[in-house]
Image (cartoon, rainbow, N blue to C red):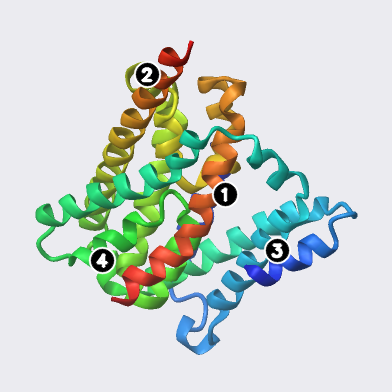
Amino acid sequence: MAAGIATGWLLRRRSFKFINTLLIVLVWALLFFLGVEAGENQAVIDGIKDLGMEALLLALAGTAGSIALAWVLWKLIKRKEGGGR
Amino acid sequence: MKGSMIIVGFFIAGIVVGVLHLLPPMSSLGNISLVTLYALIFLVGFMIGNDAEIFKKFKRLNRLYMLLPLMTIVGTLAGCAITTLLLPHRSLSECLAVGSGMGYYSLSSVLITQYKGAELGTVALLANIVREVITLLGAPLMVRWFGKLAPISVGGATTMDTTLPIITRACGKDLVIVSIFHGFIVDFSVPLLVTFFAGL
């Protein structure tokens, strides 16, 4: 990643529209290979329902946690701005 | 939204190919997914370095807003840590590794597959896609109930690209730079945190 930032910075005067396209194609390729890997794995195929539930649970928990702290920070910012005026 | 659907489509196509053994086993192909991943990370870095304006914009940001990425990371990890209690067969570090993806499903799922195998990698992929979908669909409601920072926090690493349009619409133009800054910082933390927890 550091190498990428450095290269990007050195070439910052030029425009690289195609990078976005390349990025999307790479993500597609990556997810395809990931699917192949998961599909070859019998344990994953057998447990897909349980894995889905786990994923949903973790997603909701992470979402709830980040909402809670973002709310706290929002209240804090609002109070400071209100007091400053 | 359409973008994530296409991505899910590729994943499903991959599963079908894997189940039917249409390709030689992945293990015989060497580290093809790892090489793809490195190329991807390089390109992400390239784009950040290529945007000369981005650092100048960050300097004008209110200090308190700079705490948001920290809130996101701590909140997500706390939530996932609690989930460990409900998933007795998963260790704390496994739950935290999945949570550390923070919506960056492509990167986190591949990293976790490398470290922990395809099973947890699949959980990571699904969990982080769900998180992005929650952001895309729930942003207006979150703003109403929990303030304008909530959708940015839930968006995690995606708030500088995929979820930025919806956040802009739900939170207003004032918070665009907060959203980009947040996505930028969280983006960086994903590979670090995921490899850290997956390596434990």
Q: Give the spatial CA distance, label 1 vs label 3.
A: 13 Å
User: What residue appears at the point 44 percent right and 23 percent down from the top-left corner?
Assistant: B148
Q: Are marks 4 and 2 on the same chain?
A: no
- The residue where tag 4 is placed is B94
Q: Do labels 1 and 3 share a chain?
A: no
Please report whichever mark, 3 or 2, sits nearer to the chain's N-terminal start.
Answer: 3
Q: Mark 3 belongs to which amino acid?
A: Ile
Mark 3 surroundings within 10 Å by alpha-carbon count, few (fewer than 14), some (14 through 19), many (20 or more): many
**Residue farthest to the top, as pictured:** A85
Q: Mark 2 belongs to which amino acid?
A: Arg
Rendered position, B111 above or below B100: below
Q: Give the spatial CA distance, label 1 vs label 2.
A: 26 Å
Q: Is residue A20 left or right of residue B191?
A: right
Q: Give the spatial CA distance, label 4 vs label 1.
A: 24 Å
Q: Is residue A46 left or right of residue A39?
A: left
Image mark for residue A5? 3
Image mark for residue A79? 2
Disc 3 is placed on an element classified as helix
Q: Is residue B77 left or right of residue A82?
A: left
* Label 1 chain ID: B
Rendered position, B79 above or below B32: above
Q: Are marks 3 and 2 on the same chain?
A: yes
Depth order, front residue of B63/A70: B63
Image mark for residue A53? none
Q: Mark 1 belongs to which amino acid?
A: Phe
Mark 1 surroundings within 10 Å by alpha-carbon count, few (fewer than 14), some (14 through 19), many (20 or more): many
- The residue where tag 1 is placed is B184
The nearer-to-camera label among 1 and 2 is: 2
The nearer-to-camera label among 4 and 3 is: 3
